[in-house]
Image (spheres, rainbow, N blue to C red):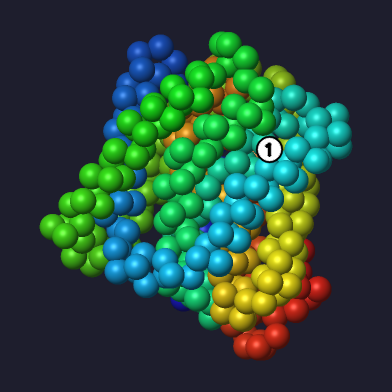
Amino acid sequence: MLNHLRLLFARFTLVLLAVVAAATLWPARGQGAVLFDWLTAAAIALLFFMHGAKLSRQAIIAGATHWRLHLLVFACTFVMFPVIGVLLKPVLLPLLGEQLYMGVLFLCVLPGTVQSAIAFTSLAGGNVPAAVCSASASSILGILLTPLLVAALLNMQAGEAVSPLDSILSISAQLLLPFVAGHVLRPLIGGFVDRNRAWLGKIDQGSILLVVYTALSASVVEGLWHTVSMTRLMVLALVCCVLLAQVLWLTAVLGRRLGFNRADRITIIFGGSKKSMATGVPMAKVLFGGAMLGPALLPLMLFHQIQLMVCAVLAQKYAREGDPDLNPEQTPAP
């Protein structure tokens, strides 16, 4: 199963790079850009409809009683990450420039992943029902919290983004309503969705790739690669590695210090250290526009690939050792 996940991630990474290259060489313009905007809106609605349909109510109920674990995962996702991003501003702003630093802050306020957090938790021997509950709740809470945190941290000015209330309403209309509709219809379509998760997962990835192409096309037309050099991209990749290493270490330490057992600590590590590209890319399209959209997505795209590779190694390590004492000092960094 781990080899299958690695192959899947490797393929997605290669296709994602191809999409970035296509958006750079052949960006959508004029009526083509309008068409892709319509297709993107439909793909986003379908993506969140399927997420809602996949969400098992029984799994949520089974994991919901573990409130201490969920509070810690939410705190890591929506408090610890943003605090780290703010504290690193004196270092990151000169290294990355204002636009990429804003992209890092946007990354820090996003909700966690669902699919990969659950998959890695399962492989490593963690608390899977709790992982399902916390990851799903994180995605739902993010629809409300992320626009508020973006406005608070980025000090957005008029013309750069809509107001927090408008952002929440827009995100709710584009993301939350399809999600709720899918979950409401789960009794009717849940069996079909569960039986066809493999190829439905390709719809998820296709939707993400379509949004990435449309968003990057708009930014390339606005001069993205004239403002972001290869050197800054390399620095940004290093920043993402350092950020992930910090969060992995802190989640391991907090889980141990607060007395959680091994299975729960694994869930906290994989649930509290991840950021969702499936949610982040559509949110970026709603919250940002024009030349700012590309820089907002670049940190997320890099961090997403790095977290998958690192967590695949961590999951294999924890599954292989089966040690009842998960030592945070031995948690490897990217």
Residue 206 picture location, percent across and down: 38, 45
Left or right of residue 95: residue 15:
left
Left or right of residue 267: residue 213:
left
Residue 90 picture location, percent across and down: 86, 34
Residue 300 higher or lower than 155, as above or below:
below
Residue 194 picture location, percent across and down: 25, 65
Residue 133 higher or lower than 224, as above or below:
below
313 vs 14, nearest the viewer: 313
Residue 136 higher or lower than 226, as above or below:
below
Q: Which residue is mark 1?
A: 104
Give the position of the C terminus as an image quadrant. Answer: bottom right
For mark 1, give the secondary structure: helix
Q: Quadrant of residue 148?
A: top right
Residue at image coords 81%, 73%: 329
Left or right of residue 211: residue 157:
right
Residue 4 picture location, percent across and down: 47, 70
Q: Is residue 174 visible?
A: yes
Q: Quadrant of residue 260?
A: bottom right
